[in-house]
Image (tube, grey):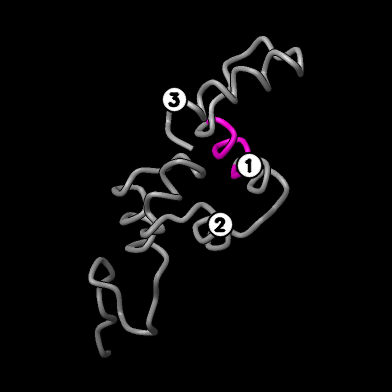
């Protein structure tokens, strides 16, 4: 099945179902992943199901966050039990 055949198939399905909104394979894929997200599916599972190589792609599409937001969250929340650079070490009395 080539791209044109698939497009015709979706147009026919759309017509038969009485759908008046746009309907494409990409829209169905996005709807599938959004539905999973809205029902509590872990983003790492959505990444695998969507076939994304990078979790950041999944986060951008389904969490609405940018790479900078992800970096800021890691910088703020990831703690290896060491003193953070932004915090001053206590002085000895």
65 displayed left or right of 41: left
Residue located at (54% from left, 26% from top)? 24
Residue located at (39% from left, 76% from top)? 79
Q: Which residues are magenta?
A: 27-33
- Report which residue position mark 2 lands on: 49
Element carrying mark 3:
helix
Can you give x and y, in whole percent of width and height, for residue 32 in the image? 63, 41
Q: Residues within 10 Å of mark 1 (few under 14, many from 20)?
A: some
Q: Are marks 1 and 2 in contact (CB under 8 Å)?
A: yes
Quick one: 62 or 52, which is closer to the camera? 52
Q: Are marks 3 and 2 in contact (CB under 8 Å)?
A: no
Can you give x and y, in whole percent of width and height, for residue 68 in the image? 29, 48
- Report which residue position mark 1 lands on: 32
Marked residue nearer the N-terminal end (1 or 2): 1
Element carrying mark 2:
helix
Can you give x and y, in whole percent of width and height, for residue 39 in the image? 73, 48
Residue located at (50% from left, 44% from top)? 63
Q: Are marks 3 and 1 in contact (CB under 8 Å)?
A: no
Verify whether residue 28 appears in magenta.
yes
- Report which residue position mark 3 lands on: 4
Q: Residues within 10 Å of mark 3 (few under 14, many from 20)?
A: few
Camera-nearest label, 3 or 2: 3
Marked residue nearer the N-terminal end (3 or 2): 3
Verify whether residue 24 appears in magenta.
no
Picture quarter with the C terminus: bottom left
8 displayed left or right of 74: right
In the rendered image, the vertical position of residue 27 relative to residue 23, given as above or below: below
In the rendered image, the vertical position of residue 38 relative to residue 45, given as above or below: above
Marked residue nearer the N-terminal end (3 or 1): 3
**Cα–Cα gap, marks 3 and 2:** 25 Å
14 displayed left or right of 50: right
Can you give x and y, in whole percent of width and height, for residue 60 in the image? 41, 44
């Amino acid at each position: 099945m080539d791209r044109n055949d698939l497009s015709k198939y979706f147009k026919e399905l759309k017509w038969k179902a009485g759908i008046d909104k746009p309907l494409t394979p990409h829209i169905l894929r996005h709807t599938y992943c959004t539905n999973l997200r809205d029902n509590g599916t872990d983003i790492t599972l959505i990444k695998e199901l969507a076939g994304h190589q990078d979790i950041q792609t999944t986060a951008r599409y389904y969490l609405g966050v940018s790479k900078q937001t992800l970096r800021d969250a890691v910088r703020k929340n990831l703690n290896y039990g060491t003193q953070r650079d932004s915090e001053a070490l206590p002085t000895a009395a």
